[in-house]
Image: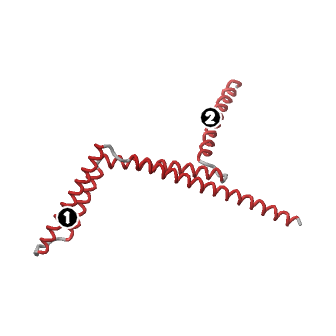
Amino acid sequence: MSDTNTTTDAQEEWADMMDDVNDAVADSIEQNMAAQATFMESWADAVEDSVPEDEDLSEGIDGYNRAYEVWMDAAERMFERSADASQGEDVDPSEFRDIWLQSANEAFKEVMGTSAFAAANGQLIEAMMDMRDEADAVGQDTLAQMGFATRDDVVEVGERLVELERRQQELSDKLDQIIEASE
């Protein structure tokens, strides 16, 4: 009969523990959804605020125009080399690849070198950093709810350990002074 009571107690403890885990998972999912909603709101705000100033916008458009010109020049060179090949000239196929690769590099430089691209990239990185911070906070909360040590807990233990080591060294030094004085 005591085996039955032990089994029943173990089952109740298991059920209680699973309830706690389920609650922690449900809270974690809820926090995750809240973090995603916050990210989407911040992303929407960033996109709303991402319209560059007139000078940056003008520079960005100029960069895209220069990139377009690079692509058009590449298309013209490709057409010329294709015409040469159709007239019997020996054209190495690698020339076509090289034209497109060089053009792609030049076009990307034209676009990526603008302050509008830099501003948009900066806003994207800022939004990603905010999202990472929010995800980190959710992770820390989830760990805490599940009874695991969080980063803050480990940092606190480390700080306390350093303080204990400092105090222990002070006591050791004072003890050494007392021993020297008594000899």
Residue at position x 23%, y 54% in the image: 65
Residue placed furthest toward the top? 181
Q: Secondary structure at mark 2?
A: helix
Residue at position x 16%, y 71% in the image: 82
Question: Where does the image place residue 68, in percent across and percent down from the top left?
Answer: 23, 57
**Residue 139 shown left or right of residue 130 in the figure:** right
Residue at position x 28%, y 55% in the image: 108
Q: Is residue 69 above or below residue 155?
A: below
The residue closer to the viewer here, 50 or 103, is 50
Question: Where does the image place residue 110, in percent across and percent down from the top left?
Answer: 25, 52
The crowd level at tag 2 (other Cα within 10 Å; few <14, some 14-19, many 20+) is few
Marks 1 and 2, how far apart in space?
Answer: 72 Å
The residue closer to the viewer here, 158 or 54, is 54
Residue at position x 70%, y 56% in the image: 20
What amino acid is found at the position of numbered circle 2 in the picture? Arg
Label 2: which residue?
166
Question: Where does the image place residue 179, in percent across and percent down from the top left?
Answer: 69, 28
Image quadrant containing the C terminus? top right
**Residue 95 shown left or right of residue 140 in the figure:** left
Is tag 1's residue or tag 2's residue first in the polypeptide sequence?
Answer: 1
Label 1: which residue?
75
